[in-house]
Amino acid sequence: MILQDKTIVEMVLDKEENKTYFATYKDNEIKREASLEIEEKLFLPYPADKDFLTNDVILFPSAPIEYVDQKELIKEIQYFVHKYLTVSDFFEKICTYYVLFSWIYDDFKELPYLRGLGDYGTGKSRFLKTIGSVCYHPIFTSGATTVSPIFRMLNDFKGTLVLDEADLKISDTTTELVKILNCGFAKGTPVLRSEGNGKSFDVKAFHVFGPKIIATRKLFDDSALESRMITEDMNQNFPRKDILIHIPSEFEEEALCLRNKLLMFRFRNKGKSFIKTEFEDRSIEPRLNQIAVPLMSVIDDAQTIKELQKYIREYNDTIKTDRTLDCNYQILESIVLLLDKGNMEPTIGDITRQFNENFDSSDTITPKKMGYLLKKTLNLKTIKTRDGYIVSKDNKEKIEILRKRFGIELISDVINDVNNVNNVNNVNNKKEDVQEIMF
C-alpha cells in the first residue's frame, strides 16, 4: 500500500514474537507500527494466529534489512536458486530476475508467468517451493483448492500466486483458475464474481494482477494463455548430485533473510521502475513483447537480456503450433526405432525421414525444423559430419532417461519379453506333458 504522502506500507510477520506489524518507509526512514490511522480510520495488520499465516499459505518478511547493493542481491538470489534447484543455466538467471521483478511488479502494466513443465518426479514441486519462497507475498495453493479463497487472497494481498497441479480436467474450478491466469497478466483486468448469501447477490471485481509461478504436466489448450508463459521443460533436467533430496531446516531461514532484503529493495525501488521500450521487438507477436519487455526492464545483465530475446524469438517461431509434447514423443520414438535398427548415430535427415514415414502430420516436418526441435525441446546434442548433422552417442544417457520417461519401449526389449514368455510357456507345456505321462 502506498499512502498519499508517498509512504510505502508493508505488513511484516515476526514469528519469534508471534506478532504482525506494519513496516513503513518514507524519505529513507523506516518505522515499525502496530497500527496506522489513515483518513481517520484505524488499520490493523492481520493477526499472527490467522490460519493462512500459521500454515505458511502466505509468506511475509519479518523486517526490512540492508543489502550491499542490487548486484550483490542478485547474486544472493541466484545462489539460493542454484543451491536448491536444478534448472537450465538460462532459466536459473530468469528465475533470479523474476524474483526481483516480483517485488516491484506493480510498477508495470503487464507481466509474464514462470512455469515448470514436466511429468511426475521431475522437480516441479521443488521449483515452486524454491522460487516461490523468495517472491513477493507468495500465496501457495494448488489446482485442487477451492477458487474463492484464491480470488480473495490475490485481491487482498496483491501477491505472487504459486500454483501447483494447474492442469486439471475440465471443471468449474479449472475454468475459474484459467480466468485468473488469463486476466492476471495485465493491470486493470479484474475478474467479476457474484457474491451473496443465497437471498441477495452483489457483483464484486477481484483484482488478480500479479506474478504467477505454476507447474503443469502438459501445455494449456488456450494458445493465448500459453503465450504468457516463460517455460522450463523439467523433463530435460537431470538432478545435480549436489542438490539435497530433502529440503534442510536452514532453507526457511535463508528464504526469510532474502525476503527481508527484498523488502528493503522494494522500499528503495518502488515507483522508480519503467518500461524500457528499446527492448521491444516488432518482428514478434505483440503479446510476447508484453510479457518479455517488463522483465527485461529490471535485468541489468546484457547477456541475460540477449538470451531472453533469443528465447522469445524462438518461442515466437514455435507458438503457432501446440503439438510440442506430442512431437517430442514422436521424434524420440523415431530416434529409438533408428537405434533399434543399428543406426547408432542417426543424421537429422534419417530422423526426419523416419518421423515423416511413421506419423501423419498436417505439414511434413523439415530437417531444419527437426534440428531445432532436437536441440531446443529435447536438448540433444548434434555434431556436424560429412554426412550432415548427427545425434551423437554422447546423448545415449539422455535418450535412455527420456525414453523411460515417455514410456517408449525398445523393440529388442519387446522381443526379449516375448521370447521369455515363449520359453516359460514351453517349459510349462513340457511339465504338463510329464504330469500326464506320470498319471
Image (cartoon, rainbow, N blue to C red):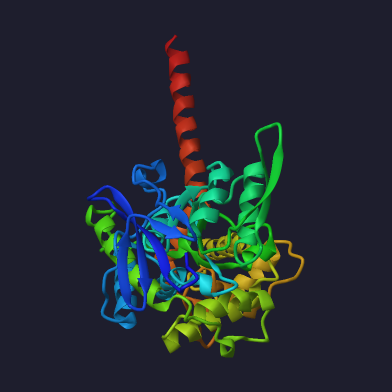
Residue beneath the point at 26% across and 74% down: 66
Q: Is residue 403 visible in this depiction of the protein? A: no
Residue beneath the point at 57% across and 90% down: 278
Return the residue found at the far top: 439
Residue beneath the point at 54% across and 78% down: 294
Return the residue found at the far front: 40
Return the residue found at the far right: 362
Find residue 257 and report its horizontal and vertical position in percent.
Answer: 27, 64
The picture quadrant where one finds residue 223 is bottom right
Find residue 403 and report its horizontal and vertical position in percent.
Answer: 49, 57
215, above or below 102, in the image: above
Residue beneath the point at 51% across and 64% down: 211
Which of the two residues, 403 or 416, is positioned nearer the viewer here?
403
The picture quadrant where one finds residue 134 is bottom left
Which of the two residues, 393 or 435, is positioned nearer the viewer here?
393
Q: How many marks?
A: 0
17, above or below 362, in the image: above
Find residue 125 and report its horizontal and vertical position in percent.
Answer: 42, 53
Q: Is residue 215 visible in this depiction of the protein? A: yes
Return the residue found at the far bottom: 278
